[in-house]
Image: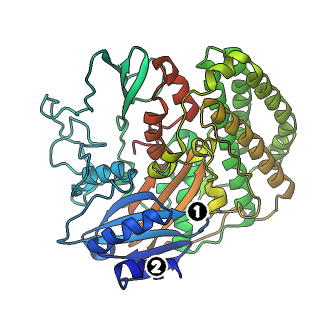
Amino acid sequence: MSLLEQIERMIGPLGAVEGKNNELYVSVSAQELQRAIPFLSTTGYELVSLFCAQDFDGLGFTLFYVFEKAGFKQALVIRTDLGDDETVSIAKTYPSACWYEREVADGFGIQFHGAYDTRRLFLHETYPQGFHPLLKSFKNSKIRTVESSEKNQYQFKQMNGEGVCHVAVGPVHAGIIEPGHFRFSVIGETIFNLEVRMFYKHRGLEKLAEGKTPIECVKIAEAVSGDETTANAVAYCIAVEKICDVAVPRRALQLRMLLLELERVYSHLGDLAGMCVDVAYPVGASPFFVLREEIFRQNEALTGSRFQKGTVAVGGLTRDIPADALKSLSAYLADFKSRFNLATHIDSSFFSVVDRFETTGIVKSELLEPLHITGPIARAAGKAVDTRVDHPYDLYAELKPKLITTESSDVLARFYIKSQEVNDSIRLIQMVLSQLDGGLVSVPWEVKDGYALSIVEAPRGQSIHWLYIKNGKVDRYKIRTASFCNWQAIEHAVLGNIVPDFPLINKSMNLSYAGTDL
């Protein structure tokens, strides 16, 4: 029995069904959605995104619920048009829906009946009541803010009892990092609750994309998170290419893959170094910092940018990569691997480092699906999930990444996973270099109207981009990075640990503030 047949058996005959580009769109009413949700949750479908679009197909508001299931290449997108029906929260069945629903409420003013958390998400206290910036009626302009008062203060969860203390960290931090607020509830030094509050960096990128041409929005995709420039640019371009039926040249696909894996390498190197620094072992961090700087210099030689900006384009690349830069990269990687493996061997053999890493910051495996935790965090907890394998894009179906997992789910496990993934990324890059085709790196293309979903594996995990082009312009661009979901894992990972372990746990995940606060 097919999925559609199973759903129809549960809720009756379906409305419009559309399948394309590894996406299956199913239109249902609000009541049918509520009947389908329990079925989907008990048959292994994870909620990977939930978002709203206004005036989609000439209608009012449309909610899109995106699901995936292990072993299925196709993503399931359930669409429901909002009319007089009550919009009901699904967060009690799918806890990951909580932030999505709060995000939709802030952006569009849509309330979800039965939601267990109705606090604002990205609209902080100084935004006026009734302000919903993703409505079509709102035009980008200066916002008249209001003064924060006791009445509109954000209400953190109350934790009371004898010996309970609250420790507030942030949103402004001692280092040169982005803002985020962490409120710990402790007895002594032991943490028994953590509440994370993000969205101090909200930049309105999705609103900024409205009315832009598809070419103009490449730079918006690059700005989502600076150290995932290429992953987000590729995700966006894949969505445009699906809509506009663009066949990207093979050489461009090979070079994209090379850049994506280099991005993964320098991201993981920063994480490995940061973990060492946070246990007062800067000597062990130094080799990783040196190698990371060298990768940045390779990036600059290849693309003209240390973060590979301005390189990925719809239809391929903005320009070819010089042959001498590729030759230099090949020679460098032969030396890189031995130096990298020596550094990881020394660090993982150092007793005081292992002692701090081991059993610290455990993410329980039973939380992975309800919160939709992905990337190295999930793989370190034993979940065999990687978008490059599950939903292969570009050349990943051909040049297969190794799916590396372990089950201890602590900081040491995340150190191991990231170090192994660096080695595998180097292997993939060397395969690309050995098979590199000649020819074009871009093709001409024409803008078409339509919509498409793209899913990629960024260094931090799964990122999803959904794009709707209408009358040749971007009408809705929805981005959900891995950090949006993974931040919720840290609230659980710190429990039972002591406050001084928080920076280490945080660094082992290395989640993006800006990549969450769009």
- Residue 117 in the image: x percent, y percent? 26, 45
Residue that badge 1 annotates: 70
Residue ranking furthest to the front: 162
- Residue 408 in the image: x percent, y percent? 63, 37
From this viewpoint, is residue 44 visible?
yes
Kindly state the secondary structure of the residue where label 2 is placed: helix
- Residue 161 in the image: x percent, y percent? 26, 21
Residue placed most toward the observer, 426 or 318 = 426
The kind of residue tagged 1 is Ala
Q: Is residue 484 above or below residue 502?
A: below
Residue at x 70%, y 35% (from the top left corner): 416
Where residue 411 sits, quadrant-wise, is: top right
From this viewpoint, is residue 223 visible?
no
Where residue 21 sits, quadrant-wise, is: bottom right
Residue that badge 2 annotates: 6
- Quarter of the picture containing the C terminus is top left
On the picture, is 389 further left or further right than 96?
Answer: right
Residue placed most toward the observer, 510 or 193 = 193
